[in-house]
Amino acid sequence: MEINILYRDAEICVVQKEPGLLCEDTPDGIPSVLREQLQIDYVATVHRLDAGTGGAMVFALTKHAAAKLSAQLQAGELTKTYLAVTHGCPDEQQGIFRDLLFHDRRANKTFIVKSERKGVKEAVLSYRIKATNNGLSLWEIKLLTGRTHQIRVQLGSRKMPLVGDRRYGARDDYKGFALWATELSFTHPQSGEKLLFSSLPPEKDPWKLF
């Protein structure tokens, strides 16, 4: 296995994560593969994408970079834009979804709840619909919070599940689910330069319908 590297210097490595790969530091996870591929000792995960999600990710190659990027993530300064394909379309072509989410670790599933309690966190995203085709919609989504399975549950709970996301309501045969981290923006931990990286989903269904 070889990871597709979009950019690399002494501090960071930006990659295109393929669906199915794990971003955690496991024997077959991206950090472990990168250490072998780049012949280096230190690779740290800064932010996460679900196993089924593809797209741009940045990994830290030094402890200094890991601390700086983690701080940006916590401050909302490391931003991600997603593309998604869903069944159905919202009434409004653009807007904001705001919910309270609870993640059940044992079931590895997130639920929308009505009131705050221990473990419940607010989830906010903004969206605009880029196109529709035969009952499917192409979304551009910006996360204003980063919760586990956030996009999947916020869309699925509104009866607009991601294509292929049977855990959150889809009823189709698509392998994987149609969610892609298409833009990644952050400040370089060493130079302070503002960086923007892009990654496009594959030219196959359901993406090629748009």
Image (cartoon, rainbow, N blue to C red):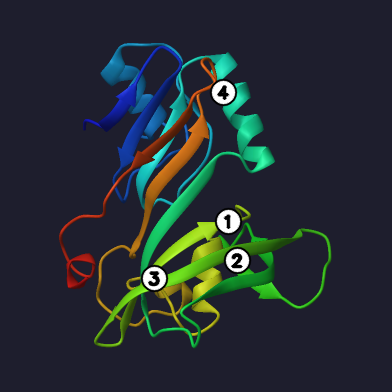
Asked if the residue under mark 2 is in contact with the one under mark 1, i.e. CB atoms within 8 Å, the reply is yes
Left-right relation of 51 to 68: left
Q: Nearer the viewer, residue 129 or 180?
A: 129
Q: Nearer the viewer, mark 4 or mark 1?
A: 4
Q: Nearer the viewer, mark 2 or mark 4?
A: 4
Q: CA distance from mark 1 to mark 2?
A: 7 Å
Task: First in sequence, mark 2 or 4: give its number.
Answer: 4
* Percent of width and height locating residue 163: 33, 73
Left-right relation of 132 to 61: left
Mark 4 crowd level (few <14, some 14–19, many ≥20, 10 Å Cα): many
Please name the residue that numbered disc 4 is placed on. Answer: 66
Left-right relation of 179 to 194: left
Instruction: Name the secondary structure under disc 3.
Output: loop
- Residue 52 visible within the image: no
Q: CA distance from mark 2 to mark 3?
A: 13 Å
Instruction: Name the secondary structure under disc 4.
Output: helix
The amino acid pointed to by label 1 is Thr
Task: First in sequence, mark 2 or 3: give its number.
Answer: 2
Please name the residue that numbered disc 3 is placed on. Answer: 165
Please name the residue that numbered disc 2 is placed on. Answer: 110
- Residue 24 visible within the image: yes
Please name the residue that numbered disc 1 is placed on. Answer: 148
Instruction: Name the secondary structure under disc 1.
Output: loop
Left-right relation of 206 to 27: left
The amino acid pointed to by label 3 is Asp
Q: CA distance from mark 4 to mark 1?
A: 21 Å
